[in-house]
Image (tube, coloured by chain):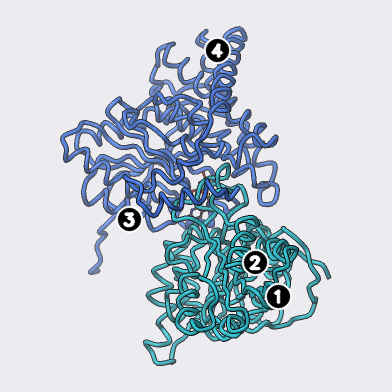
Amino acid sequence: MKMTMAQAINKCLFQEMERDESIVLIGEDVGVDGGVFRVTEGLYDKFGRERVIDSPLSESGIVGTAIGMATHGLRPVAEIQFSGFFYNAFHHIEQQASRLRNRTRGMFTVPMVVRLPYGGAINALEHHGESMESVFIHIPGIKVVCPSSPHDAKGLLASSLTDKDTVLFFEPKRLYRAFREEVPEERYDIPLGKANVIENGSDVTLISWGAMTYVSREAVEEAKQQGISVEHIDLRTLSPCDWNSIHRSIAKTGRAVIVHEAKKTMGFAAEIAARIAEKDLMHLEAPIKRVTGWDIIIPYPPLEKHYFPEKKRIARAIVETAKF
Amino acid sequence: MPISRVFEGSVDYIQILDRYGTADINYDPNFSEEMLKRMYIFMVLARRWDKKNIALQRTGRMYTYAPLEGQEAIQVGATLALEKEDWAYPSYRESMIYHMRGIPLSLVDLCWKGIEEGLKIDPKWKCFPYVIPIGTQLPQAVGAGYALQKRGKKGAVLVFGGDGSTSEGEFHDAMNFAGVLNTPTVFLISNNQYAISVPRKWQTKSKTLAQKALAYGFHGVQIDGNDIFAVYTTVKQALKKAREGGGPTLIEAVTYRIGAHTTADDPGKYRPKEEEEYWRERDPITRLQIYMKNKGYWDSRFEEIVNTRCDKRIEEALKEAEAFKQDPKEIFKHVYADITEDLEEQMKECFEEGSQ
Ligand SMILES: Cc1ncc(C[n+]2csc(CCOP(=O)(O)OP(=O)(O)O)c2C)c(N)n1
C-alpha cells in the first residue's frame, strides 16, 4: 500500500499497540487531536485515554513520567511535539534514561521510544526547524534513529518498539507528507544499527540521513548525469552507527561527502569524518567534504533557504570531490 | 485530637461588567469617556487586525499566526493599567500590547510575516520580545523585576502566560522565586480553556489556576477575562502593590480562544461548536459597547469612524511591513557581538558561491 511517512508511522503505532498491550502513548495533543502532524490520528478512538494520554504541557513531565512507566513494565512512546521543545526533558534523558542500565549493572532499564519531529523547511515559526541529533548522539546509552522514507520509518519504529534501550526517534517533519511509497501492511523489522546502501557506486560515497537523504537523491541524480557514480549510504541509525558500512564504501570509492541539516560545528559529520580519517586515510583520494547548515541561528521561513543544504550545494560538493 | 489546621485559603472571582453590559453599582470604576473610548478603540483595532491577519495567512502573505479573537479585553485592559515605568512580558497571543506600548504596528506585522527584524524592539518601550517556547518568559520576568528593584527603578513587571504554561516547570520556578524574593511581578494567566487541543481540565486537577499562588505564599485571584473593567482594575491594583514592595500576584483571567490555536490548527477536531456560541454571548467588545451606549458614548456613527480609522491604520502598517526588504546577510551578523572569522567565511560561502 502506498503511504506517506506520517501514515506509515501511524500504521506502525496502530499495529504495535494491538500487538503489545504495554505500549502507551503520552504527549501534548497526541490524543483527541491526533497530534499536530496527525501522526497519532485515530489511536485515541481505538485505544482510549488510558493508552493514549493527552498530557499537561510539560516536556519534563512527559519524559520523566515515561521513564517511570518504562521501568515498571509499560512501553511508553513519548512524543515531544517539536524537537526544538525538548530541552526541558533533556535532564531526564541524560541523567536517568541513558544511565540507569549502567548504574544498576542491568537490573533496571528504560525501554521506551521518544518521538521527535525534527528539522525545518515547513514554513513554521522559530524553534520549529532545528536538527539537534548530535547532542543526543554524544550521550552513551541511548539510541538515535532517523528514518528517511515511509518504508524505513515503519520498519525502524517497529524495531525501536521491541528494543531493550531508550530510542530517540527523529522524524523529519518535511518528509511527513513529501511523498508516498509502497509500504508493506504487515509488520516488519528494520534492524537498528545498520545502514542502508540506497545506491551502489564507485566514485564518491555520499552519507546522509533523514530529510537530507531525500534532498541528496536529486543531487546524486544530477552527479550521475555528469558521469559520476555515487554510492549513497543512508545511515538509518545514528547511534550506534554502522561504521563498517562506511569504511567498506570508502575503501571502494576513496572519496566522501557527508550531508546533514544540522549546524556544521560538532554536527555528526565531524565524527564521521574523523572516523574515516582514522581508519581509511590510505584509501582517501580527496579531502572529506561536509555539506551542512551554517553555524547560525536557523532563520525564519523567508530566509531559511539560505541555511539548509539543498540540491545545488550537494551536487557541487559531489562534483568537486569526484574531480579533486 | 492532635490535629490543627495549618493552612486555609480561598480564591475570589471578580466580574464588574457583566455580559449584558451592566456594571456593578458598587464597583463601577466610572471611567472617563476618553478612557472608555480608548479601551473600545484598542479592542476593535485588535479584533480587526486579527481578522486581517487570518485572511492574509490564507493567501500566503503571512506565516503561521496565533489568533487573539475573544481575548482582547485582557491585553488591552492590562496594558492600559501599566505605568510608563512598568515592563510588559507578553506571550505570543498578545500582539496588541506591543503596539499599545508605542511600537509601530508594522513592526508587529513583520514578526508574523516571519521577519526577524520584527523583534527589533527598542527597549525604551519596556516591552520584552515574545517567546515561543512555552513558559520561559515567566522566571525571566521574575529576574527582571528583581533587577528593577535592585537598581532602584520604580517599575513592576507584568508577565503573560496561557493556561498550558502553568504546567511547565518554569511556571512553578517563577512563582516560587517571585514569592521567596518578593519581586514586583504580576503574573497574568489567560485561561482561554485550551492549550492547542488539550482542555483546561486535563492541564491540572486544581479547580482554579489562581489558587496555585496560595501554595507559593502570595495572593491569587480569578477574574472575568472578558470584562475589561475587571482586568484593568485588578491588574492596576496588583501592579501598585508590586511597585510598593508588596510582592507578586497571580491573576487568572478566564476567557476563551474563539479562533483556532494557530492558522495551522482545526478546533473542530477537539471542541464542540456550542462552546463558541456560549462564549460569543460573553464577548468583551459587545458588553463594553452596550455599556458605552447606555452612557451616550457610543452610536453607530462612532462605530463607523472607529472601524474606518482602525482599518486605515492596519492597511498603512501592512503596506509598510510589505515594503520592508530584508538583508539575508543579517542571519550571520548578530550571532555574536562581533562576527567571527569562521562565520565571515561561512557567510561568503553561503552567498557568494550561492547556495540559492
Ligand atoms: C516548551 C514548548 N512546548 C510545546 C510547544 C508547542 N505549543 C505551542 S503553543 C502550545 C499550547 C499553549 O497553550 P497555552 O499556554 O494555554 O496558551 P495559548 O496558546 O492557549 O494561548 C503548545 C503545546 C511550545 N511552543 N513550547
Distance from label 1 to label 2 (Cα)? 10 Å
What is the C-alpha distance between the residues marked 2 and 4? 64 Å
Cα separation, mark 4 vs mark 3, equals 45 Å
Q: Is mark 2 within 8 Å of ligand 1?
A: no
Q: Label 2 is found on which chain of the structure? A: A
Coordinates of residue A294 in the picture (x, y in percent): 48, 55
In the picture of the structure, the residue carrying the numbered disc 1 is A198
Relative to A307, residue A268 above or below? below
Q: Which chain is cyan in the rendering?
A: A
Residue B90 at x, y percent in the picture: 42, 38
Q: Is mark 1 within 8 Å of ligand 1?
A: no
Q: Secondary structure at mark 3?
A: helix
Question: Badge 4 is on which residue?
Answer: B293
What residue is at 69 percent from the left and 67 percent from the top? A43
Q: Is residue A240 left or right of residue A220?
A: left
**Residue under label 2:** A213
Q: Which mark is residue A289?
A: none
